[in-house]
Image: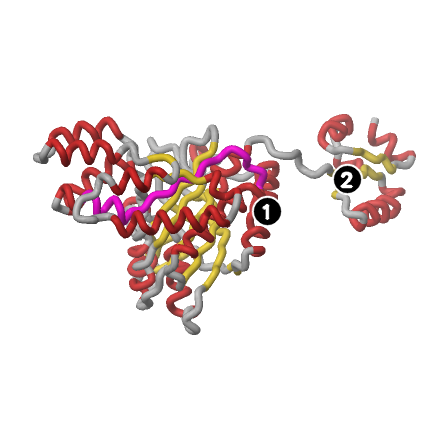
């Protein structure tokens, strides 16, 4: 084996060391319990899926898929997201009673990265999917649950932005006329390249009025008043249904109470996930340059698995959430009992009593310790149960 690769990992893969693992475990547990309180049931799906089904439905770029062949020659992918696998399961096994499903998950997903990207190729998503409910109430529930979940983790400073992909599509197609032009302009929005957006609009063969409408569109961010501002930009009522969805959503969120204070409208919001069909949202937190959570409505995804059903959901990026949380509470203290052979039984009994009382205890044979003084720096309490032989070893 080349020494070059002895300590290297594949591009984008990361190790999780004990302290970070404990932070992830605690945060994951808080999130999972909150989701369960809202009636969501956790499921698991395999890490490997068929490319022709889940891979094609995932809306992740082709170059980001990890592909491999099974022994029968079928192309497989490491799951690039969790929404598509859950849609597969729901369509094939769970949507028998024609009742809404509330499903949750916690799983790693895989997306290949370019070397210059510096982003993880494997990361954990925790999220929910409400499948079979096409009402705005379901969208409101998802947003309220996401806010409640993040607050439960201790995150204080964050903002949830809500948009509607249907509004953008209707508004742009009414002005631009072709899907190709819409796609080009939408790309500027996704990249948040507003300077490029404005320059591109100036070059379009449009009337000065339509150009100004496209420029004014960039200012559609804020509170409830944004809906009225957006309606003034419309002609022929193209996009009015989407605005009615957002108005209804706002009323629903207000009824949740304090939730509404976390929400702002951003009608310029778009996503790289092409299966979104309606309301969509992202969460941003201080000192994190990417969304820590995102979601939205995807009413046509299940049809790719032979089942027509409305659906909405969200996913939290655990790594980004931990970055936003920063230094949370210290890990639970661990005691250490150092023992010699003649007091081993006594040490075992003492450790068992402490564990039964809910304490974390390390048992350490003194002959396996090279630096006893270092133990006092690592463990909350060090208890020495050593006889004469043990004292000699300690010297």
Image quadrant holding the C terminus, namely top right
Q: At 28% from the left edge and 45% from the top edge, which residue is drawn?
A: 63
At mark 2, the secondary structure is strand
Residue that mark 2 sits on: 364
The vertical placement of 383 against 167, above or below, is above
* Front residue of 84 and 163: 163
Q: Is residue 99 visible?
A: yes
Q: Are marks 1 and 2 in contact (CB under 8 Å)?
A: no
In the rendering, at what x and y percent does residue 246 appear? 35, 48
Where residue 24 sits in the image (x, y, percent)?
56, 42
In magenta, the rendered stretch is: 153-172
Q: Say which of 363 and 107 sits in front.
A: 107
- Give the x, y percent position of residue 73: 30, 62
Mark 1 = which residue?
30
State whether residue 10 appears in this view. Answer: no
* Earlier sequence position, callout 1 versus callout 2: 1
Q: Quarter of the image containing the N terminus? A: top left
């Amino acid at each position: 084996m080349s020494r070059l690769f002895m300590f290297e990992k594949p591009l984008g893969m990361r190790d999780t060391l004990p302290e970070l693992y404990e932070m992830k475990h605690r945060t994951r547990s808080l999130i999972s319990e909150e989701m369960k309180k809202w009636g969501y049931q956790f499921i698991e799906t395999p890490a490997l899926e068929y490319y022709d089904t889940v891979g094609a439905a995932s809306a992740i770029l082709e170059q980001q898929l990890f592909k491999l062949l099974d022994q029968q020659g079928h192309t497989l992918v490491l799951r690039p997201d969790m929404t598509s696998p859950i849609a597969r399961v729901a369509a094939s096994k769970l949507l028998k009673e024609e009742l809404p499903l509330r499903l949750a998950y916690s799983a790693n997903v895989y997306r290949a990265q370019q070397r210059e990207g510096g982003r993880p190729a494997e990361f954990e998503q925790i999220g929910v999917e409400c499948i079979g409910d096409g009402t705005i109430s379901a969208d409101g529930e998802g947003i309220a649950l996401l806010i409640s979940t993040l607050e439960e983790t201790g995150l204080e400073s964050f903002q949830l932005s809500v948009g509607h992909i249907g509004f953008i599509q209707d508004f742009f197609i009414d002005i631009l006329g072709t899907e190709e032009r819409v796609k080009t302009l939408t790309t500027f929005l996704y990249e948040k390249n507003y300077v490029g957006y404005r320059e591109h609009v100036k070059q379009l063969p449009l009337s000065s009025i339509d150009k100004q409408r496209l420029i004014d569109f960039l200012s559609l961010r804020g509170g409830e008043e944004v809906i009225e501002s957006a309606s003034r930009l419309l002609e022929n009522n193209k996009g009015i249904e989407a605005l009615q969805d957002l108005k209804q959503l706002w009323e629903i969120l207000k009824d949740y109470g304090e939730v509404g204070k976390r929400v702002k409208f951003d009608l310029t919001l778009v996503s790289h996930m092409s299966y979104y069909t309606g309301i969509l949202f992202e969460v941003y937190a201080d000192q994190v340059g990417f969304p820590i959570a995102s979601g939205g409505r995807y009413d046509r995804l299940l049809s790719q698995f032979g089942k027509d059903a409305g659906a909405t959901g969200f996913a939290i990026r655990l790594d980004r959430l931990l970055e936003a949380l920063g230094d949370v509470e210290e890990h639970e203290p661990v005691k250490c009992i150092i023992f010699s052979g003649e007091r081993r039984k006594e040490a075992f009994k003492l450790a068992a009593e402490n564990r039964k009382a809910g304490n974390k205890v390390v048992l350490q044979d003194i002959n396996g310790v090279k630096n006893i003084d270092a133990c006092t720096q690592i463990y909350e309490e060090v208890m020495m149960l050593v006889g004469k032989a043990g004292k000699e070893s300690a010297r």
